[in-house]
Image (cartoon, rainbow, N blue to C red):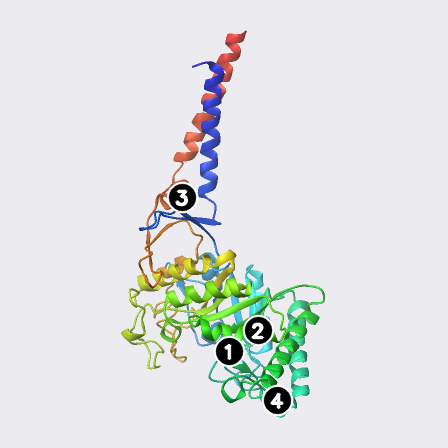
């Protein structure tokens, strides 16, 4: 081999080695192994939102709830951050009786989140307590207002909250106008299901939403945030289309479709997959699964009845174990990442912190991401950057996939735990330098 050819060969080996090292440390992509049936190779982008709704946190902390990571007590927010959670959702109630989820508490918690660099989704319920498909009660102070007065109240309140958040440097990155508003909100003025499913009611509902959106926009004074409309039809395409067809017919402008998806209420993962795919193609809007959860056990530690406690509430192939919870989240992430045109932007796990304490029982304790003693579960690793290979069988009707230890994962671990690759690169570089020195001596 001629000296010049040898130089080129060594140089290329050095270059390729460093390129390999750089690519293995890239958290933006993960490699999906060939399908068991199609032998196709896919590269799945990392989701931009890997979030959690931790609105219960102040109440849990006030009742002596503790959280642990590797045996050490830690601030919940820091535990979530260290495991890859990058966005936090907070609900806000107008005048809650006990003060939790109030404006002042939201302002305080928003500071903690932004100080740690989290994205922030604000969820307006426009109620003094829970607003969901079964109840969308007006705040007591608004209960006797006329329609025009109610619309102004929505604008004023929304604008006030957003302005105060902006002034303290904690502007949300996204805002929900209402929570699970499939049948409207601020009932009965903004109600649209059943006997209220008529054009006049949809007009009022749309006007109330627009009042909230305008309140957000005016409070930002030039800044921009995304607006989300959130319904609870994750696995139900007909219901989803009914809502968004109607709301878009009223020319309501928004950015993100938000869906709740709890399997025991909303169907299978295949139902979710088909729905999200259709919505992305039909409406060309970003989509976020803004509420979801799955049990890690069917046992309990307190006397509060758990919402999920029966085998019949589980998805086939996903047991109520830590591994079952982890697999559910892995497959959920895959479904969202495969939404057409990259419209699936992420998800929020609802109430991962909702453990039981001595004075504050929990009906969600077996759906949290912490065990009954407050220790973080291994399933939280699903929020971490994707450096693994996922093999998906297309014959599975539930889009279930099995995650295996892959070459990518092994190589990534090697680069962070041993100097093997770096040594190769250094040796190659030294050889290259020696060749140049020898060549120059020969030339002389």
Q: Nearer the viewer, residue 308 or 197?
A: 197
Secondary structure, mark 1, is loop
- Residue 182 badge: 1
Name, please, the residue furthest toward the right: 221
Q: Name the residue carrying label 3.
A: 412
Q: What residue do we see at 40% from left, 72% from top?
A: 262
Q: Secondary structure at mark 4?
A: helix
Tag 3: Cα neighbours inside 10 Å, few (<14), some, or many (≥20)? Answer: many
Mark toward the viewer: 2 or 1: 1
| Callout in the foreground (2, 4) | 4
Are the residues tagged 2 and 1 within 8 Å (C-beta)? Answer: no
Q: Which residue is mark 4?
A: 141
Q: Identify the image quadrant of the N terminus.
A: top left
Q: Secondary structure at mark 2?
A: helix
Camera sees residue 430:
no
Q: CA distance from mark 3 to mark 4?
A: 57 Å
CA–CA distance in space, label 1 to label 4 = 24 Å
Name which of mark 2 and mark 4 comes first in the sequence.
Answer: 2
- Pick the residue in front: 228 or 421: 228
Q: Of tags 3 and 2, which is closer to the observer?
A: 3
Query: Which residue is labeled 2 in the image?
Result: 106
Q: Residue at x 36, y 74 (%)?
A: 264
> Is 340 positioned to the left or the right of 171 in the image?
left
Q: CA distance from mark 2 to mark 4?
A: 20 Å
């Amino acid at each position: 081999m001629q000296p010049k050819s040898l130089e080129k060969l060594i140089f290329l080996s050095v270059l390729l080695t460093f390129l390999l090292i750089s690519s293995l440390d890239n958290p933006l992509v993960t490699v999906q192994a060939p399908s068991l049936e199609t032998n196709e190779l896919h590269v799945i982008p990392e989701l931009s939102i890997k979030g959690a709704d931790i609105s219960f946190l102040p109440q849990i902390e006030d009742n002596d709830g503790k959280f642990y990571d590797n045996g050490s007590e830690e601030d919940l927010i820091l535990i979530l951050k260290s495991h890859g959670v990058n966005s936090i959702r907070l609900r806000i109630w107008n005048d809650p009786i006990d003060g939790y989820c109030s404006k002042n508490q939201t302002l305080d918690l928003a500071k903690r989140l932004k100080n740690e660099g989290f994205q922030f989704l604000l969820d307006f319920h426009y109620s003094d307590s829970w607003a969901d498909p079964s109840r969308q009660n007006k705040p007591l102070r608004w209960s006797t207002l006329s329609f025009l007065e109610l619309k102004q109240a929505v604008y004023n309140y929304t604008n006030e909250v957003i302005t105060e958040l902006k002034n303290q440097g904690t502007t949300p990155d996204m805002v929900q106008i209402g929570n699970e508003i499939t049948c409207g909100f601020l009932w009965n003025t903004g109600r649209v299901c059943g006997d209220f499913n008529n054009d006049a009611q949809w007009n009022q509902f749309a006007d109330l939403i627009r009042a909230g959106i305008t309140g957000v926009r005016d409070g930002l004074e030039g800044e921009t945030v995304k607006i989300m409309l959130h319904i609870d039809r994750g696995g139900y395409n007909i219901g989803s289309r009914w809502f968004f067809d109607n709301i878009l017919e009223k020319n309501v402008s928004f950015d993100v479709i938000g869906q709740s998806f709890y399997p025991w209420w909303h169907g299978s993962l295949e139902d979710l997959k088909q729905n999200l795919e259709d919505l992305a193609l039909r409406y060309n809007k970003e989509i976020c699964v803004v509420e979801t959860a799955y049990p890690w056990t069917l046992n309990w530690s307190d006397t509060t009845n758990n919402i999920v406690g029966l085998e019949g509430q589980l998805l086939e192939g996903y047991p109520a174990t830590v591994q079952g919870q982890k697999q559910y989240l892995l497959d959920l992430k895959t479904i969202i990442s495969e939404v057409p045109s990259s419209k699936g932007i992420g998800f929020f796990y609802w109430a991962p912190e909702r453990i039981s304490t001595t004075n504050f029982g929990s009906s969600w304790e077996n759906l949290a991401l912490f065990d009954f003693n407050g220790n973080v579960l291994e399933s939280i690793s699903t929020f971490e950057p994707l450096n693994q290979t996922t093999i998906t069988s297309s014959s599975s009707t539930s889009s279930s996939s099995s995650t295996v230890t892959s070459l990518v994962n092994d190589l990534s671990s090697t680069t962070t735990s041993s100097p093997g690759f770096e040594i190769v690169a250094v040796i190659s570089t030294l050889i290259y330098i020696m060749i140049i020195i020898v060549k120059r001596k020969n030339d002389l």
